[in-house]
Image: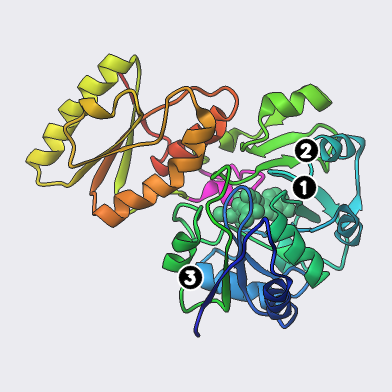
Amino acid sequence: MITEVVKIDELNIDMEKIRKAADILKKGGLVAFPTETVYGLGANGLDAEACRKIYEAKGRPSDNPLILHIGKTEQLLQIASEISENAKKIMDAFWPGPITLIFKKKNIVPDSVSGHFGTVAVRFPSNIIARTLFWEARLPIAGPSANISGKPSPTKAEHVFHDMNGKIEMIIDGGSCDFGLESTILDVSCEKAALLRPGAVTREMIENVIGKIDVDEAVYKKVTGNAAPKAPGMKYKHYSPDADVKLVKGESKKVTEKINELLSEAKSKGLKTGVLATEETKMFYNADFVLSAGRRNDEKEIGANLFDILRKFDELGADIVFSETFGYSGEGMAIMNRLNKAAGFECLEV
Ligand code: TXA
Ligand code: MG
């Protein structure tokens, strides 16, 4: 299959291109689209056969359900059967935007798409290209991140092309994603809301609107044995480049010293080494490749760069990557969740 890449300018949306993309979706094909978080791989969310192609293109385990995307809030009524008071408050505060909500679902949504829990995850993105596309298609659009399963999510159209060329009909290039980390997932289908995946809408922002929430343990630690995270995707090793990722945590000077020690060890074994550093520390490391995620106190910048940098280490051919860690407050919780997952939740403290 030839994958067509179509550039769309969000300040001047070409409706002809949008209609062409919407037609592919209506006919059961796959179109990758930009959002403010990461690029999504879209298919008609009410068509189990179209969604099966998503699983095939991504190599995604079939027990990992898909988020359905909408272009206007009225599309929510087509797929969600109950909208709790908490849900309404969160929608008022943060939609459209980078938070996905879990609702009890209507029967029109196939179980093979949304999972066998009787729920559906719904996202109403703020990205105007995505919203125009979903509304034009007049369909809820299933949209996992447009990466090969297990790889870092794509934050640029080039990343999607790298993973999906030849497997899907179209990629809409809408430039770099603003946030660069996947949406927050909040379960509002039960009495007490629960955070299943941290993102740009932070725990603090949510608690300011609806009070205390639960946080699923899969956010903080590796789930083992029979324990199951509430968002099935959280159990897979994820976001990881081909290189081994090792986290080193502690006071800045000690971290730099420890990483340099580990770098010499790795080099003596003939490994190609990388360091995920910050603007403040990048000059101190003796690695083959030192990439800065941004300024240490700018969580937004670090979040936006993280996946691009993890992918760059692969392009460069790093075998092992040592990374500094960040605080857990605000968006730091999402950054650390993705880094922890890349490192299999192992972290060396110095
Ligand atoms: O930012 C995002 O959310 C991106 C963009 C494209 O919208 N999408 C995305 O989708 O990250 P995906 O499939 O890569 O991650 C969706 C997560 C998975 O961990 C999945 O297990 C969980 O949402 N999920 C989907 N439906 C669910 C449900 N009914 N209950 C609990 N978790 C669900
Ligand atoms: Mg994903």
Label 3 residue SS: helix
In the rendered image, residue 315, in percent from the top left (x then y), is placed at: 29, 56
Between disc 3 and disc 1, whose residue precedes?
Answer: 1
Task: For marks 3 and 1, give the CA distance.
Answer: 28 Å
Residue 231 is a magenta residue: yes
- Mark 1 sits on what residue? 102
Q: Is the magenta stretch mostly helix, strand or loop?
A: loop
Q: Does the residue labelled 1 lie within 8 Å of ligand 1?
A: yes
Going 61% across and 45% down the picture, which residue do you hit?
228
Label 1 residue SS: strand
Residues packed near mark 1 inside 10 Å, few (<14), some (14 to 19) or many (20 plus) = many
| Whether residue 24 is situated above or below residue 213 in the rendered picture | below
| Whether residue 316 is situated above or below residue 178 in the rendered picture | below
Going 68% across and 28% down the picture, which residue do you hit?
203
| Amino acid type, mark 2 | Phe
In the rendered image, residue 329, in percent from the top left (x then y), is placed at: 57, 22
- Residue 341: in sight, yes or no? no
Q: Indicate the quadrant where residue 187 lies.
A: top right
Q: Does the residue labelled 3 lie within 8 Å of ligand 1?
A: no
| Amino acid type, mark 1 | Ile
| Whether residue 211 is situated above or below residue 316 in the rendered picture | above
